[in-house]
Image (cartoon, helix red, strand yellow):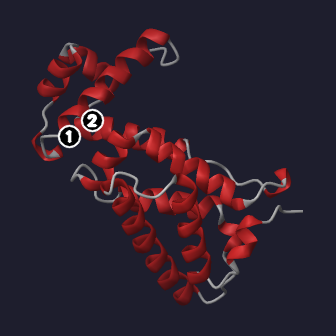
Amino acid sequence: MNYSNPRVRRTKNYLKEALIELLKTTPFENITIKAICQKAAVNRSTFYAYYSCPRDLIEEIEHDILSKLPDYDPVAHKPFIESITQFMQYIKDNETTFRILLASSADTSFGEQIISAVMDKYDEFSNFTDESENEMRFIFFVNGVLGVVREWITSDFRLSVDKISRLIVDMAFRSAGINPANAYRKSY
C-alpha cells in the first residue's frame, strides 16, 4: 500500500483525529476500534489496512510528534534556545494533542519518550563521566521538565513560549552543571 498517497495520508489523519477526540472523554483502554472508525467515518477494514489495534495508532501519533522535534545543529551557528523555543511553540500550536497525550492514560511513557528524544538530540551538552550521576541527573531533568510542561499546558500557557523556553533551558542546564548562558550563544 502506498502510504505517501494523499488519500491514504488523509484517511490516517482522520483516524488519528478521531482517536485524539475520543481521548478527550474516554480512557485509552476503553477506546475500541469500532468507536475510532465511527468517529472517523471509515469502516473497520480501512482501519485494519493501516493498524492492528488502537495502540498502533497512538504510537504512530507519538512517532509523528517525536519526528517533529527540532534538531540542534551546532554547525548552523544558532543558539540552542532557538531549538527549544521552536518545540515549545509546536506544543502550543498542537495544544489539544499534547494536553491529551501528556495528561491522559493513553501512554504514560510518552512524556519520557519526548525528553529522551530531546536528550539524544542534544547529547553534546552532557559532560558527566559518572554513569550513575548522569542517570540521576537525567531522571531529575525528565521529571522536572515534564512537570513544568504539563503545568504550562494546564495553566493555558500562562507564560509566553519564549519565557517557558528560557525557564526550562535555565533550569535544565543548571541541573546538568552547565552554565545556562551557553544555551544563548551561537556555536562556532
Q: Position of residue 35 (x, y in %)?
A: 12, 26
For disc 2, the neighbor class at 10 Å (few under 14, some 14 to 19, many from 20) is: many
Which disc, if any, is residue 124? none
Judging by the rendered image, the residue that carries numbered circle 1 is 23
For disc 1, the neighbor class at 10 Å (few under 14, some 14 to 19, many from 20) is: many
Looking at the rendered structure, the kind of residue marked 2 is Ile
Callout 1–callout 2 Cβ contact below 8 Å = yes
Q: Position of residue 69 (x, y in %)?
A: 57, 48
Q: Secondary structure at mark 1?
A: helix
Q: Residue at 34% of width from left, 51% of height from top?
A: 156
Q: Position of residue 39 (x, y in %)?
A: 18, 21
**Eyeballing the image, is 36 above or below 140?**
above
Judging by the rendered image, the residue that carries numbered circle 2 is 20
Judge from the rendering whether residue 187 lies leftward or rightward of residue 13; answer left or right.
Answer: right
Q: Residue at 15% of width from left, 19% of height from top?
A: 38
Q: Quadrant of residue 174?
A: bottom right
The C terminus lies in quadrant = bottom right
The residue closer to the viewer here, 82 or 160, is: 160
